[in-house]
Amino acid sequence: MTQDDPPAGTRADLIAAGLHLFGQQGFAATPTRALAALAKTNVASIAYHFGGKEGLRLACGAEVARRIGQVAGPPATELPATRRDALDRLEAMLRAMVVFLTQGPQAQDTVAFILRELSEGGPAFDLVYDAFFLPKHRELCALAGMATDQPAEAEETRLLVFSLLGQAVYFRIGQPVICRRMGWTGYSAAETTAIADRLAANMRAILRSQP
C-alpha cells in the first residue's frame, strides 16, 4: 500500500474514529476506549496499528492530507502556458474543493479535525501543513501570480489565495446559517453548483481587479 492509497480494515475504522472524536472533543479529551468503541474494535488495536494514541493522531493527519490531495491534486511545480490556462486551473481546483466540502461525506470530520489541530497547535497540523498545505499554497500563489502579473510570493498574492480558499471553507463550517438563510434543507447537487458558480465568479472578479 502506498501513501496515496486509502486506509483499509481496522486501520481505516480507527482513523475514521480519530478524525471524528479528535475533531469534536480534542485529542486530550478523547479516551482510547471511546476511539475503540466507535471503531468497533479493542483498545489494544490502537497500539498494534499506530503504536498508541499519538500515532493515531498523526495517521489522521496523513489521511487528511491524502483526502485533500485527492480533491485538489498533488502540488505541481510546472505552470500552465497562458494566463487563461492559469485561471482555468484555479477555477477547476476551486470547484473541486466546493464539491468536496459540500457533498463529500467525509468533509465534516476532515475540516473539524484540522481546525481542532490548528487551535491546539497539534503535531498533525504540522504534518499536513508541511506535506501538503505549504507546497499546494505555493502552487496556487504561482497560478494567481501568473493570472495577475504579480510576484507569486508577494504578500498580496498570498493573502489573495487565502481569501479564495476561505470563501469555500466557510460554506462548510457555516452550513447551518447558510441553509437557514437560503431556505435550503441541505446542500443538494443544485446548491453545490450554485455555490461553485458564485465562488468562481468571485475569483475571476477579484483577479481582474488586481493592479
Image (cartoon, rainbow, N blue to C red):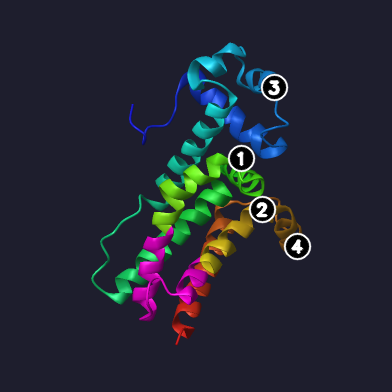
| Depicted 22 relative to depicted 38: above or below | below
User: How far separated are the C-alphas under marks 2 and 3?
Assistant: 25 Å
Kindly identify the amino acid type of the residue bearing the numbered disc 2: Ile
The main secondary structure of the magenta stretch is helix
> Which residue bears the numbered disc 4?
181
User: How far separated are the C-alphas under marks 4 and 1?
Assistant: 24 Å
Which residue appears at 66% of the width and 53% of the height?
A: 173
Residue segment shown in magenta: 137-161
> Which residue bears the numbered disc 1?
109
Quadrant of the snapshot with the C terminus:
bottom left
Mark 4 vs mark 2: in front: 2
Q: Is residue 15 visible?
A: no
- Whichever of labels 2 and 1 marks the residue nearer the N terminus, that label is 1
> Which residue bears the numbered disc 3?
34
Which residue appears at 45% of the width and 78% of the height?
A: 207
Which residue, as the protein is rendered here, is positioned at the far bottom? 211
Image location of residue 130, percent across then percent down: 44, 49
> Which residue bears the numbered disc 2?
173
- In this view, the residue in front, 48 or 178, is 48
Q: Identify the secondary structure beneath mark 4.
A: helix
Circles 2, 1 touching at the beta carbon (< 8 Å): no
User: How far separated are the C-alphas under marks 3 and 1?
Assistant: 16 Å
Kindly identify the amino acid type of the residue bearing the numbered disc 1: Asp
Kindly identify the amino acid type of the residue bearing the numbered disc 4: Arg
- 11 horizontally vs 76: left or right: right
User: How far separated are the C-alphas under marks 4 and 2?
Assistant: 15 Å
